[in-house]
Amino acid sequence: MYFSKTVISRLHPGVARIAPILALGLALFVFPHSLSAAQAQPEGAAPAPLPPAFTATGIPGFWDPRARVEPVDIPSGRSLRILTSDDFPPLHFGGPDAVPTGFSVELARLVCETLQVPCTIQVRSFSTLLDALESGEGDVVAAAFAGNPRLHERFAVTLPYFRFPARFIARAEDAPVAITAADLANRRIGVVSQTAHAAWLERYFPDAVPVPAPNAAIARSDLQRGASDLLFGDGLSLALWLGGRASQECCVFVGEPYFDDRYFGEGIGFVMRDEDARLARAFDHALHRIWEDGAYARTWLAFFPISPLEPARAFLR
């Protein structure tokens, strides 16, 4: 895994200082905020991969280039306190100099620059962030809270700037050409037990043979040693693992990314208090501008040298 010095130099100075740690360590990180078990899907629904145009470069585009979002003014003199945690790389984590960084944090900094609003970044425990926001100890949460009805009932949330894809990976020498229910019938699919990914796999690939594992590290080891033929799981953690030393370049993405709100969440947006809905709209406008001028792509490339949305063909040797 590597990080482009040119890309990193355009971001917050803290990013450059933590790049070596990211390159060596992110692929070994096991995400602490696990996905909850999914509810049953309606009968007849079919899994839909992300449209090819969306993954042509491996960089997402959540904003319609034809849309023109009206700017929203922020009251003069207002400053913003951005709350985050330091335990969820590459979205938000602490660098060696204790300066918070990560994809979500750097996007928040770019939004503040775009809106010309002074901001401070404050680190708290992940489990306390929403309560701290609600009690007025901060103004914006920049952390990996996937949108859901309960979150929207309680807070104002921007449109997503990140979504967690689900992906299949396989050993490079044994990667299937196509990913369909028929193609994977009787194939052994590794998956972490009692997760949304396990429920999704059972729903859409009923003829596959699941190989349950108690955690992601064991599921990856099963794939490497041939105890499973493929592995299905969180595309972000799999991308980090594929680009790290632990994978020993054994494996590749196969198929395309899958999104399913009912299983994997609606995506991550910035979270504000409900009375700050106007601020959320201002963030939406700023994010659209950041995406249009290429700053979003530069930030993405700095933190995702192997994109979890990368087309599978880019990994086939």
Image: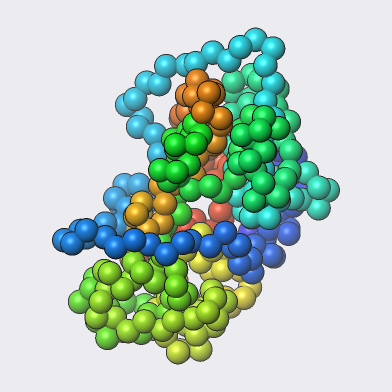
Residue 10 vs residue 100, the one in the foreground? 100
Residue 273, placed above or below residue 75: below
Q: Where is residue 54 in the image (x, y as percent from the top left)?
A: 35, 47
* Relative to 202, 291 lies left or right: right
Is residue 33 in view? yes
Q: Residue at x 40, y 43 (%)?
A: 149
Residue 25 vs residue 35, the one in the foreground? 35
Q: Which residue is drawn at 65% across and 50% down?
A: 126
Q: Where is residue 134 in the image (x, y as percent from the top left)?
A: 61, 34
Res 47 → quadrant:
bottom left
Residue 307, placed above or below residue 253: above
Res 12 → quadrant:
top right
Q: Which residue is drawn at 64% across and 29% down?
A: 139
Location of the N terminus by quadrant is bottom right
* Relative to 117, 217 lies left or right: left
Residue 59 vs residue 164, the one in the foreground? 164
Q: Where is residue 116 in the image (x, y as percent from the top left)?
A: 64, 19
Residue 27, placed above or below residue 150: below
Is residue 16 in view? no
Res 131 → quadrant:
top right
Q: Which residue is drawn at 26% across and 60% down?
A: 41
Residue 204 vs residue 195, the one in the foreground? 195
* Relative to 208, 140 lies left or right: right
Q: Where is residue 127 in the image (x, y as percent from the top left)?
A: 64, 51
- Display coloring: rainbow
- Considering every residue shown, the one lying at the far left of the view is 44
Location of the C terminus by quadrant is bottom left
Q: How many marks?
A: 0
Residue 182, placed above or below residue 128: below
